Structure formats: C-alpha cells, structure tokens
Image (cartoon, rainbow, N blue to C red):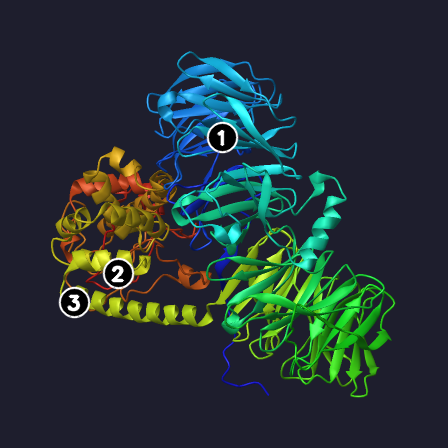
Amino acid sequence: MANTNLQFKTNYAVESKIEPFYKGGKVQISKDEKYIFCTCESRVNVLEISTGKIVHSVQHDDQEDITSFALSFDDEMLVTASRALLLKQWDWREAQCTRSWRAIHTVPVASMTFDSTSTLLATGGCDGTIKFWDVLKQYCTHNLKGSSGVVHLVQFHPDISKLQLFSSSLDCGIRLWDLRSSQCVCVLQSHYSAVTSLSFTPDGDTMVSSGRDKICTVWDLKTRKATRTVPVYETVEGVVLLPDDEDLSDIGVTSKNLHFITAGSKGVLRVWEASTARCVYAQTLNSTLAAVSEKEEEKDDDNDHCSLTYLLLLPASSRLATVTADHNIVLYQLPALTTQQQFVGYNDEVLDVKFLGKGDSHIVVATNSCQLKVFELLTNSCQILYGHTDTVLSLDVFKKGFVFASCAKDRSVRVWQMDSDSGRVHCVAHGSNHANAVGSITCSRMKASFVVSGSQDCTLKVWDLPADLSTTGGDLHHLTPRATEKAHDKDVNSVAVSPNDKLLASGSQDRTAKLWSLEAAGRVGMLGVFRGHRRGVWAVCFSPIDQVLATSSADGAAKLWGLQDFSCLKTFEGHDASVLKVIFVSRGTQLLTSGSDGLVKLWTIKTNECVKTLDAHQDKVWGLHGSRKDDKMVTGSADSNITLWMDVTEVELAEEQAKQEDQILKQQELSNLLHEKKYLKALGLAISLDQPRTVLTVIKAIRQVQDSHKLLEKTVLKLRVDQKESLLRYCAVWNTNARNCQDAQAVLQVLLTHLPPEELLQYQGARTHLEGLIPYTERHMQRIGNLLQASMFLNYMWQKMRVAGAPSSMNRDEEMDTTPLAQPFLMIDKEKGMGSGGEKRDADDSDGEQDEDPNDAVKEDEDDEDVSASNKASTNTGSVENGASPQTDGNHHCESEQSSEEEDPEEVNVMKCLPVPTALKCQTFAS
C-alpha cells in the first residue's frame, strides 16, 4: 500500500532546456575562446563553451533570416546582415542594437569579416560587389566591383599594414584587392570549384587554400604563385595551418616543414605535409561510423550527413573546432586530437528520452536519426553514439541506470553500457531478428537479465542478456530471442515489464492492450485483453505498487485497468489529441501524461483530477521519463526541445508558509502602528501588502481623529509615487460602494487638489481609473441631493406642526413650543381640528388605512430645532414642487389650526398626521 503520509505533487517547474541553437550557416569563436557564435534562422546565438548554455542571443526585429555575421577581433562588436538588406551593429553582451544602416548591396550579403584593428568591415554580396565600412566613422570607404556571382569568401591579409583583401566567388579564382588603389591586383587561379577557406602563416608570406575540387593549394604571396598542389581526395570545407612551435608528433608531424589539417566530406580530420603532399595522420572511426560513412559516399555528396563543414583553430588553448553537416560542434584537443566537448546544435524531432547515469546525471536521447545522443546535464556536452543504421525509435534503461537498450527501424536492438567513472558509453550487445522496424523496447526491472521488443511485424520478442556484459577487443555480444509471440493484429506501439519481472504488457495500433506472463521456461503466455480504447494504444505502464496497468491512446484518454479482471477502473480525459506517454509518479498515486497537443498533465488517481497542466512544447511530446528519486522528469518533443522539469511542490509549500507567516507579522505590525497612531507607516505598510481593505481601514482610522482633513492630507502627500498610484487604484474600487465613497472622495480630494494633472496622468492606468470614478461620483452626488431635499421637507413639516394643547393664538411667525406635554400626539385637521384625547376622527378609523412615514425623514440635531423664516420659504417653494413629499391618502386632508385665510392648499395636501414625541429630533444630511 502507498504511504499515507505521502504528499501529492502539485507542480513542476522548468529547470533547464536543451534547445536548437544552430541550424546551419556561419560559426565563429571569440578571440578569448569562451564563446561560440552561430546562426539559427533570424537569430545569432552565443554559446558559452564551459557550460554549454546559450548565454546571449540577438535577433532582427523584422524576423528576417540572418545571411551572415562577423565578430570584431576585440570581441566587442557584432555585425549582422539579413535578407532585408539591413546591417546591424550589436552590443551582443546586452543584446542591444546600437546602430543599423542599409547595405548598399542590391541583394543579400553572403560573407563579411573584420580586419585586425576592428575598425574596417568588408561585406561580400550576392551581387558580385565588395564594400568596405568604417564602423567607427560610420561610412562606406570602398566599393569593389569585378567579381562574378556570389562573393562567398572575404578575408583580410593578416598584416593590416598591407591593406589587402582576398575574396573568392563563383569563378573559382582568388582575387587580391589593394585597398589603396581600390583595384584587383591579381587573380590566383588554381581551383576548379568553389574555394572554401584560406589559412595564412604568422608572417603572412604563405597561404593555403582549400576547395570543393578535392585539392589544397599552397601559395607564395610574395611571388603570388602556387608552390604546391596537394590532392586530398575529398571535398574540403576547411583548412588550418598547424603551429610550428608545438610538439605534434602524436599526429604525424615530425619535421619543421609546413603542415596543415583538413576537414571535409569524409568526416575525419587529416594532417598533410605540404612539401611532400603526403597525409601523415588521419582520424580513425569506429567500425559502425565507418560503415555509415562508406554508405554515404555511395550517394551524392549533398546528402552526406557525416561531412565536416567548418574547421576553426583555437590557438590559445591548442584546440580545434569542427562543425558537422548535421549541426554538431566538436572540440578536439591538440596534439592528440582527442574529443574534448561536443555540442548538438539541432536535435530534429525527439522520439524518446531517458535518464541515465549515477544520480540521473545524464540523459540519452533518440532523435530522428540513426545516432543516439547522451547529454551531460551539467555542461550540456554531448556524446554521440553510432551503431544503428536507421532511425532510433525507442529507449529503455535498466534499474541501476548504467545499462540501457535501444531499438530502431533497422530491425535491430542494441544494449549500451556507461562507464561509471568516465561517463563514456559504448555498445555491448546487439540482436537482429525482427522482420520489420522495432518500435518499442523495455528492460527487466529486477536485474539486467533480459529485454523485450515489440515490432511493426506484430510480434513480441524476449532477448536474454549475458551475465557479464563487459566486452574485450571491441567484440559485441550477439543476442538471440528466447521467445517470439504473435501478439497483435497491427503494429506493437509499446511494451512494459512488471516490477517483479513476471508479467508483460503490450499496446498496439489495433486498439487493445494485452497482458502476458513471462514464464521461466521461456514461453510467453497471454493472460487477458484490455478493451475499451477507441483508437490505437500508444503506451502501457505498470503501477509500482498496485496490480494496475495504465494505458494511453490516440482517442485522447488515459485509462487504469485492474490486472485481476481486466476491467477499466478509471478514465482520465483532458488532452485534446493523442496521449502518447503515461508514467506513474508519487509511488503510484499520480500519473503524468504527454500528448500530441504539446501538453504534459499531472493527474491524481484518487480524485480523477488534473492537478496541473505543463505547457513548454509546441509539438508532440514523444518522450516522458521520471527520475529514480521521483523529483525530476524530462520531456522530449517534436519541436526539437528537451525540457528538464523539477518537482517544486515542497518549494511552493514552503514559500506559501513563509508568505503566510510574513503576512501575519505585517498584520500585527500594522495593528501596532494604528494603535500608536503612526498613520504614515501604517498606510505605507498596508499598501505594500496590496490589501485594499486594510488600506481602507487605515483611511477610516485617520478620518476619525480630530482635524482629520489636515492629517489625511499630510499622510497621503508623504507617500511615494508608486504608493500614490496604488491608492488611486484603490479609490476607484472604493468609490463603487456607497458605504466607502466618502473615504474615497476624501483621498481623491487630496490627490486632485495637490497633484498637477500632468503628474497624475503619468500614473499607470490613471486615465482608466479617473474615467471609472466619474459615473459613480455623479450617482453619489444625486443621492446626496435627494437626501438634502428630504431634509428640507422635514424642516418644512416641523414648521407646520403644532403640539396638541398649545395656545390657539400661536402665529405662523411665532416660535414653536417644544415643552413636553402629557399627551405626546399631534393631529392637524382642516375640518374638525384635534380631538381632546388625541384620537383621530371616525373617518380615519373607518377607512382602516394608515399613512406612511416619510421614506427619507431622519432625525435632526437639537441645535437645528429653530428654523429661520428663510428656511421656511425655501421649503415651501422647493421641496413640494420637487416632489420630495411623502405619499398621502387623497380621501383625507390634514388641517392646520391656523385661520383658513392663511392656509395654502398645496401645503395642506402634503401634510399628514404623525405620532411623534414632543421632544422630536431631526437630523439633516448634508454632503
């Protein structure tokens, strides 16, 4: 059973990514040999050699592809050229464009280079012209014409005092230009195909050129004649002169004569002695790579994936860098030409990925190629494994993490072993017995004893492994299948072995999954069939703790099945497309699924709930694997990205607890500040907490003290600008509620009175907040106006009422007697007056209807009992006409006890009988 104290995972965060950074084009290494600059469509990426990470990237705003770039010799300036015919100068460390100008070329720039002083830039265009730019004074200095076709190579003479430039175009000649006269001095003719690179001796007197015509030529620049032509029997893309002050005997350099190294279509580095035209050293390839290379040589050179496209010298560290046709950058250490680092510029479509090594320090990746790639996660350095001759489709790793198996379209399976000390991986066993492509493979779980493969030939095969996988002399163990079973009617997409190595599950394109027993006698027996998916089954996986099988299908669902009765226990639906992979995490209590929609989903089995959806890919997520510690996972997608995820559940929980503790402490501090009446600090703290209700509480507390207006004004004006912005935003919210509008208006009065409009409009969202304040403020003004009218009417009523028992001689202009009487009721009746007992006339009793009190009538302060004659006049002319009087019964008339000559019919109609105490108090509402 699962641990009851196990905490469910709630989230994963991206820890690192392995992204495409080079898709062909120019590559240049900085002078300090710390960074590699390479093009990737519309970007130039800067790769840090020590970490393998992309540390900088510059990109054109117009998203146009970059056709060429050049880094200055002092590593300070980067200039790029795009298809939009723009040249841009960059501060690449800050990824900022410092200057851009139109290239005078009529077509895109094909090549460019800086001189050794980093002041002169030469650009070669597809229009056959070469232009020179003074990047400091910012003007074009030369425009050289005469080349035929695309100028694909420009390079300054190493001695800048000579002011010479070498260029090459489609006519296969090497032109030497004199910048003083802006003329072509001579054309060096030797090659019959495109010239690919030039290399100079330190004194600048000798040059070596390489071409696609399979020769290299040594030139004497003093006489401008070819002194030696060396046939190299391969298309050469790069040539480098080896330094003569180092001991390079390990690579065949035994004399002081001129030696150079070439890189070309054969995919190996070769060292040549110029004087004898002899190859003194050639790299050796393993047998598999050699077979692949020979196979490629039979095809057109353009399809050669093993060829080298660039060769660069790193003199300070005595290293060489090569770029392969499949976008890998490899660093070799002189003098032995040992492989030091490899970086994969482009992975193409990632089909599978698994953790590998001690502590899951590496990952092994199957891409849309016949090569396997093993990445060290710390440095992103890659080891490329050759063995399969067609696309690798699936991978699986044994329990300890040092041995893994692979299968491919070449109908074979291979077993690989990693050296625990050096981290080097080599193939130890292989088997080939399937009749079609092998699409899935799984390893035994208890120990490295067997592997099971599923193929497009609809069969399952069990391959036993030798007890000792170590190999001697490069001989591989040959595997033969222990058992073969016709498993499905269509392709077998996935296979999985149970944790006890006794059961096998398979999923197929025929929409079913099947359970098999792995018997000791070597046979495979079917136990049952899982039916329920509407499309093909892409993945199967056993639970690590329960007798449960998980499957994922192209119908967009993942299902859990019981192994006892083969029934469907749960269905998880949420992906919009095929679910390609499913694995168990959190000791079998949760699931991770990946789909064709580019999403990875985390599910809790108990609740059938999707806890989290992770979105980091733009295409199908084929690869999904969890680490042995269950704290990481890795995903690989068809978008060429490999993403490493870290479980951040505990981190987020700790952050949430710390946040809550901090909130509690700040709330206590806020209470203390309010108690101590330190309103400025309290208001600033409340705003920093981003709690509008708490800020409102502080504002209310300020407005309750004596001389609140000045205190509020003083407090608000001392706030910082960002705090005033927040306060304005809060006011817009408070103003929507009638209970809080007075506090909002008080703050707004301070802001609008003391801050100029220009400053207010600089606040973020100020215009929106102010526009939102207007309609609610108008509504509040209308409501207060209605209250004011009601209070006026109450004043008017007060003047028309007479306490029962008062002298009849009381005139309208006399003061009203408010002395308490024994009978606290009053009545005004036009016909009969007031009864002796304060009782109403019989007509009122018979009617049965009672008049209502005024809706808006409120009590008035005692000091407002005496009302001036002017208030009476305003009441008579204003309140009644505006219709603010309470409703009265039309069948009854209230009568004043004054003479009929002084009665106003309108005033009488709005009067009504009110039972009130003698000491009636009225409160007037004002704005």
**Residue at the spot of label 1:** 207
**Residue 580: quadrant of the picture:** bottom right
Gap between marks 3 and 2 measured at Cα = 12 Å
Residue at 27% across, 62% down: 916
Residue 913, position as x, y percentages in the image: 33, 57
Q: Of helix, strand and loop, which one carries label 2?
A: helix
- The foreground one among 445 and 899 is 445
Q: Of helix, strand and loop, which one carries label 1?
A: strand
**Residue at the spot of label 3:** 675
Marked residue nearer the N-terminal end (1 or 2): 1
Mark 2 crowdedness (10 Å alpha carbons): few <14, some 14-19, many ≥20: some
Residue at 33% across, 48% down: 729
Q: Nearer the viewer, mark 3 or mark 1?
A: 1
- The foreground one among 451 and 494 is 451
Res. 697 mark: 2
Q: Of helix, strand and loop, which one carries label 3?
A: helix
Marked residue nearer the N-terminal end (3 or 2): 3
Q: Nearer the viewer, mark 1 or mark 2?
A: 1
Gap between marks 1 and 2 measured at Cα = 83 Å
Amino acid beneath label 2: Thr
Instruction: Kindly tell me whether residue 794 is visible in this rendering.
Output: yes
Callouts 3 and 1 close, C-beta under 8 Å: no
Is residue 329 shown above or below 534? above
Residue 226, position as x, y percentages in the image: 55, 25
Amino acid beneath label 3: His
